[in-house]
Image (spheres, coloured by chain):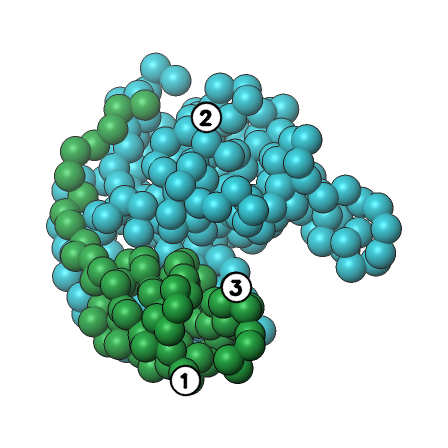
Amino acid sequence: MTDEAPQYVAARVQQALAEDERTHELGIRVDVRGDQLFLRGQVPAQERREIISTVASEAAPDLKVRNEINVVEVRDPGEEEAL
Amino acid sequence: MKAHIAAVGDIHLGEDLRGKYRAQVAGIEHRADVFLIAGDLTRHGTVKEGRLVAEEFRDLQIPVVAVLGNHDYHSDAEEEIADLLRDVGITVLDDNSTVIDCNGMRLGIVGGKGFGGGFAGKCASEFGEPEIKAFVRHTKAIADRWRIALKELDADHKIVLSHYSPVKDTLEGEPKEIYPFLGSYLLAEAVDSVGADLILHGHAHLGTEKGNTPGGIRVRNVAMPVLRRAYACYCLDGAG
C-alpha cells in the first residue's frame, strides 16, 4: 500500500464509487495528495455525501478522507427559453 | 400557438429523495404542455427504484414522455422499469416515436437512450475485436432507428429525446478523456439528416446546457446537476 502510486489509489476509489451498490456515483472527482484523499463534486442529498466518504475510506483505508462534495439545492424552474 | 416544454434528466431518485422531487414539480401544468425526461431516473436501475419513480411521476396533469438512461439498465431490469412507468401513464420511448396534441399542434418526439462512441475524428470505429465492433454497432443501430423514426414522424414540431449526448458542445466541463462514453456524433448526424427542432439529452453531469449540432439544431443538456433546477422550460413557436 505504501508503495502504491497515488494515481492508482485514486483510480481504485473512483471505480469503487462507480461500482459499489451503495453509491453508483460516476461524477465524483478523486485526488490523492500525500496521505489525504480529496473528494469533489455535487450530490442532491446529505446522505449521499456521507456514504461516498464511507465507500472511499474502505477503498483507501490508509488515507485521510477530505470530503469537499457539495449538497446542491434544486431550485425552481426559472425562466422559459424561447427557441 | 406555442408549445411549452418542460425537460429534465438524471434525477437519480432513491428513497432519500422520496417526495422531494414530486414537491418540486408541483404546478408544472401551469408552465408546460408536456414533460420530457432524458433518462437516469434511478440510481441503480432496480425494480424497487422503478416503482418509486412511477409513484413520484404518477397523476401529473400533463403528458410525461421518458427515455431510460445507463443507470436504469444497471440491474438488467430496464423492461420492468419501463412497464412500471407505462402503468402510471408515462410514455417510455425506446428508439421509437410518439405524437402529442399540443394546443392544436402535433408535437412529435423521437426518443431512446442513445449510446457512446465519441465524436467525429476522435471516435471508435467498427474495427478490430468483436467487443469494440459491438460497441460501435450498438450506436449505429440506434442512430439508424432514430433516422427512420424521424422520417416517418408526421408532426408540426419534432423533438429528439436522448440520454447520451449527440454533440460535444454540451459536454464542455467534462474531462475530454471520457467524451467517448458520454455520447456519439452518429446520433447528431442521424438527426441532422432528417431535421428536428430540438434535441434534449442528459448523462453529462458536469457539462453545459446549451449547444448545437453541426447542422444547426439546438441541443440542450437537461441533466439536473447541470440545470440546478427542478426542470428547464423551452418554448417552440408555432411558426416552426
Residues at marks 1 and 3, CA–CA distance in whole angstroms:
16 Å
- Amino acid type at circle 3 is Gln
Kindly identify which chain the residue marked by label 2 belongs to.
B
Mark number displayed over residue B212: 2
Identify the subunit bearing mark 1. A
Q: Residue at x 34, y 15 (%)?
A: B239
As rendered, which of B135 and B35 lies closer to the eye?
Answer: B135
- Within 10 Å of disc 2 (Cα), the crowding (few <14, some 14-19, many 20+) is some
Q: Circle 1 sits in a helix, a strand or a loop, which is it? A: loop
Q: Which of the chains bears the disc numbered 3?
A: A
Which is more toward the observer, B46 or B83? Answer: B46
Residue B126 higher or lower than A17, as above or below: above
Write down the quadrant of residue B144 in the picture: top right
Which residue is denoted by mark 3 in the rendering? A7
The image position of residue B105, as x and y in percent, is 36, 28
Residue at numbered disc 1: A61
Residue shown at the point (49%, 19%) measured from the top left: B216
Instruction: State which chain is coloured green.
Output: A
Colour of the chain lettered B? cyan
